Image (cartoon, helix red, strand yellow):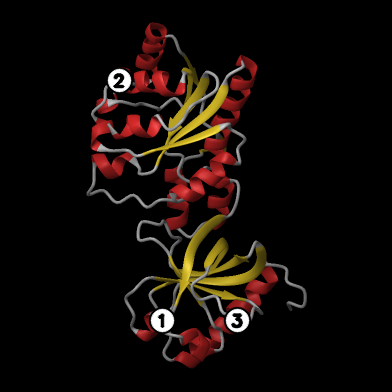
Amino acid sequence: MQVETELAKFTPEKDMLLTIGVFDGVHLGHRHLIARLAELAQKSGLSSGVITFSRHPREVLAPRTSLPFLTDIERRIELLRNEGVEAVIPLSFTTELAKLSPQEFLGLLKKHLRMRGLVIGPDFALGKNREGDTDALRQLGAEMDFNVTVVPPLTVNGEVVSSTAIRQALAEGDMKRAQKLMGRPFRLHGRVVRGDRRGVELGFPTANLDTEAEQALPADGVYTSRAYIDAQAYPAMTNIGIHPTFGSNQRLVEVYIIDYEGDLYGRELAVDIIERLRGEIKFDNPEELKKQIAEDVKRGKAILEIRGAS
């Protein structure tokens, strides 16, 4: 069984307090729950651990349903480790795992991870047909000797923090709302690939970011951004869209790094998307587009507080 093979790779030195979920985005709500996990683990003398799934369960249970991700598994593991837990355990969510009863899955956690407790949100459920809800888990905890702690959801400005709410904010291009819910700017990662060089022709050379097809993207438009090259931040502008002026239909992510000179082809780039300036516009000719880009950059510089911006 794949899940048992993956769990067997971990050899905890002491009993563990665990939380389980996808944790897509590792947003403020996730961090609120994990902070409670770490606090309880320390008080109880247990080791803290986060189990995350490399694929969202919905991709397996409802494969025709599209659910763009906020953070890929590598970035998610990095962010989770930054939260101070002692172990991050990525598992593959498979049809085989989905068929396990709550008792069977929890038995594996006790066997391989020495689980002594679970810290979960109020809507959490695990096991076949989501039979392991909070009430069922409490009953199983009494039978299998583990504790269950339910942490209430976190709200920001009256809104429950969730990955769904963040995806909605991105779809609306509302980066301020997305940042408030995530606790940091929304970030894109990708390799720089060669494009059609229209940015060079217009006087604003862009780095074309090769993002994964399942990556959640903000609404089409122009955004102020910060690009990171070798951990150094650069002011930037990011265009997301299909180039309507040129009759394209391929959705692209293009980053103009202000006042940067250098070859980025083939390199990995991280870009924080800060604020939406405008939606995508179809211009009558490239010259009008060039004038608008110049105006966008001027506004972007002011927003990013670059010295010398007027």
State how far apart marks 3 and 1 are (Cα). 16 Å
Question: Is 260 placed left or right of 276 in the picture?
Answer: right
> Residue tagged by mark 1?
282
Q: Residue 294 — which label?
A: none
Mark 2, residue position: 104
Assess whether mark 2 and mark 3 are in contact (beta carbons under 8 angstroms).
no
Tell me the distance, in whole angstroms, between the alpha carbons under discs 3 and 2. 60 Å
Q: Earlier in the sequence, mark 2 or mark 1?
A: 2
Considering the numbered disc 3 on the image, is that residue within a helix, a strand or a loop? helix
Mark 2 Cα within 10 Å, few/some/many (few <14, many 20+)? few
Element on which disc 1 rests: loop
Q: Position of residue 248 (x, y in %)?
A: 34, 80
- Location of residue 295 (image quadrant): bottom right
- The residue type indicated by label 2 comes to Glu
Can residue 202 be seen by looking at this rendering?
yes
Residue 222 at x, y percent in the picture: 51, 71
Name the amino acid type tagged 1.
Answer: Lys
Q: Residue 295 bears which disc, if any? A: 3
Please tell me which of labels 3 and 1 falls first in the chain: 1
